Image (cartoon, rainbow, N blue to C red):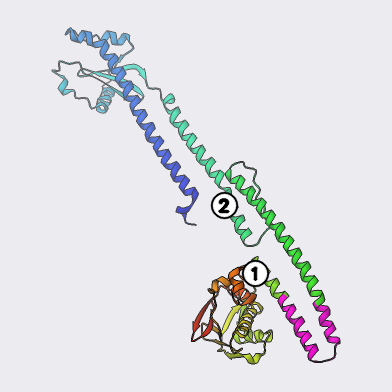
Amino acid sequence: MKWYNSLITKITLIFALAFMGVGAIMYIIHTQVKEFELQSIKMYTRAILEPSHKRHQPLNLQSLKESGYILIKDKKLKQEISKNSNFPFRRMKNSKHLIIKTIEYNSDIYAIIGRNLIFKTPNKRKILPKIILPITAIILIVFLYIATIRSILPLYSLRQKVKEFADGNYNIDCKSTKKDEIGVLSNEFDNSVKKIKKLRDSRQLFLRNIMHELKTPITKGKLSCEMIEASSYQKILQNVFRRQETLLDEFARIEKLSANELNINTQEYSLQDIVDFSLDILNHNKHSITCKITPMSLHVDFELFGTALKNLLDNGINYSDDKQVTIESSSNQIIISNSGKELEFPLDNYAQPYFLNSKKAKSSRGLGFGLFITLQIIRLHNMKIVYNRQNNRNVFIIYPS
């Protein structure tokens, strides 16, 4: 997963923007409050000195001192305050107006009066009450961020559980004690896994029982055939029982393919050996097959891939006009072709588990379960198969990975 698609990244970005927004608001509020305080002290100082100034009398500095103002005589401190005030002293020399400016310096508030009078006011900025609100807001945002991240962290564990479940592991536990939406989702998924596991176990038990019940009479029939004298009748019975046994194996394989429970064991094999195996288990006479195989190696499950080729050859003979099928190969293709009617539906339709039960498929001639098994086996091997119609022939081309 890309970092910019992560839910945590998006939440972090939202909280970062919120943090900056709160910081900007707090700064504006701090600036406005500071300005209001300075203006209030300035107006208070003016109210004390304005009467004497209007009467053109010396400024009533005594009243300031009685109000708690302290005259600053330290030249160094006066220079520092003057430097930080940017106060226009030169223009004040002949000014008819009483000019007062208040500034904050080292948490104290000073009033600059006239040319060079600087008083320390009795007002002192209280830092603690002013930082309580920003600190509280910051702590609240950080707490909400941590709580939000902690609440979505179980999603990563849940995602891993879902992946394990998709891979066929039904022995997973997703229970959650949390009461939020993710906790509810985890518990619902856990309930679903348990229900599906019960259904799977019931299906497997049913299949084992029915396969056992069906194979028992077939085994008895095969033993009975061995007791019959060699004749055409014995051969017919042997073929029937062998065919029934093959069908049961195919049905079991179909069930596993539909449930994605069929595992493959791939190794390097020669194509010629796989084709020979396919011909050995073929339900038709080998003389119906024309082989044009060039030396080629495949990394496949020998029995499964051989069964896939056998099914294609079987279908090729069953649904051909001349009961003949051709298998040939090149450096990167395996081609099976026959002369017969064109497929009524796209090839992908036959890979759907229940397509053969649909009304459309029933109305068509169809290719039976063999093609479904073949398409699933090829999919398991990460190979590609395509169907073409060339010169009135059906052509299936397998592209090994």
Which of the two residues, 171 or 194, is positioned nearer the viewer here? 194
Q: Which mark is residue 257?
A: 1
81 left or right of 382 in image: left
- Identify residue type, mark 1: Leu
Q: Main secondary structure of the magenta part?
A: helix
Kind of element beneath mark 2: helix
Q: Quadrant of residue 371?
A: bottom right
Q: Is residue 77 above or below residue 331?
A: above
Looking at the rendering, the stretch of residues picked out in magenta corresponds to 218-247
**Mark 1 surroundings within 10 Å by alpha-carbon count, few (fewer than 14), some (14 through 19), many (20 or more):** some
> Residue 372 — which label?
none
Work out whether mark 2 precedes mark 1 in sequence or the reverse, and give the earlier one.
2
Q: Which residue is mark 2?
A: 156
Residue drawn at point x = 64 percent, y = 46 percent = 176
Please tell me whether mark 1 sits on a helix, a strand or a loop.
helix
Front-most of residues 112 and 287: 287
> Residue 321: where, in percent of width, then height?
58, 87
Q: Nearer the viewer, residue 85 or 198?
A: 198
Q: Residues within 10 Å of mark 2 (few under 14, many from 20)?
A: few
The residues bearing labels 2 and 1 have C-alpha atoms spaced at a distance of: 29 Å
Residue 243: image x %, image y %?
73, 81
Check the image and report above or below for 163 versus 106: below
Residue 257 is covered by the magenta coloring = no
